[in-house]
Image (cartoon, grey):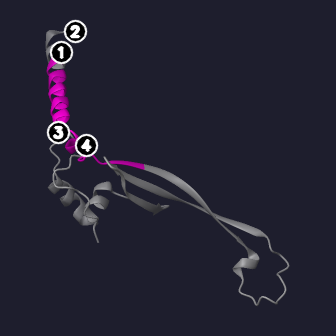
Amino acid sequence: MGGETFDRGVKDSLHACFDHMRYHDMGKQFLSRIIATDEVWCHHFDRATKSRMEWRHPSSPLPKKARSSTRASKVMLTCFFEVDGPFLLKWLPTGTTVNVSKALYRDGLIPPKTKFVGYARSNLKIDDIKSQALPYIK
């Protein structure tokens, strides 16, 4: 391992330590700027018998074939979390696409100085996210 690689590793570690010290000094203020998301597919069933699907008078006879049919579908539950717990739950039906920045901007949930996890080392600013989200907002 060359000296250049070692020096670069030391510099990266030093920068990481300074970042951790800054985050420690900021306390909960730093954590309040982090937004995490999780998605899960949920299956739900709508059980309906043939007798329930028909309109009939209570005194009329029951239909001869009262078999049960199950209509199944699935929806995606998207949860957005912050330091105090979940703050936004979105149910999306199958076939719907979502852009996280679009949803947060549309609902007015992006604080001015928020850094998104995964973009911390980039120069991505809220104005950039807004400009990317504007074409998708109806």
Residue at 72 percent across and 83 percent down: it is 54
- 3 or 2: mark nearer the eye: 3
Residue at 85 percent across and 79 percent down: it is 64
Which residue position holds label 4?
31
The part of the chain drawn in magenta is 10-38
Position of residue 53 relative to residue 79, above or below, is below
Locate residue 100, reporting x and y percent.
Answer: 32, 55
SS at badge 2? loop
| Mark 2 residue type | Met
Q: Earlier in the sequence, mark 4 or mark 1?
A: 1
Magenta portion: prevailing SS class? helix
Residue 97 is at least partly visible in this image: no
Check contact, mark 1 vs mark 2: CB within 8 A: yes
Left or right of 131? Residue 54 is right
Which residue position holds label 1?
5
Which residue position holds label 2?
1
Front residue of 89 and 74: 89
Locate residue 135, reporting x and y percent.
Answer: 24, 65
- 4 or 1: mark nearer the eye: 4
State the mark number for residue 26: 3
| Mark 3 residue type | Met
Which image quarter holds the N terminus? top left
Residue at 19 percent across and 22 percent down: it is 13
Neighbour tally class for label 4: few under 14, some 14-19, many 20 plus, Cα within 10 Å: some
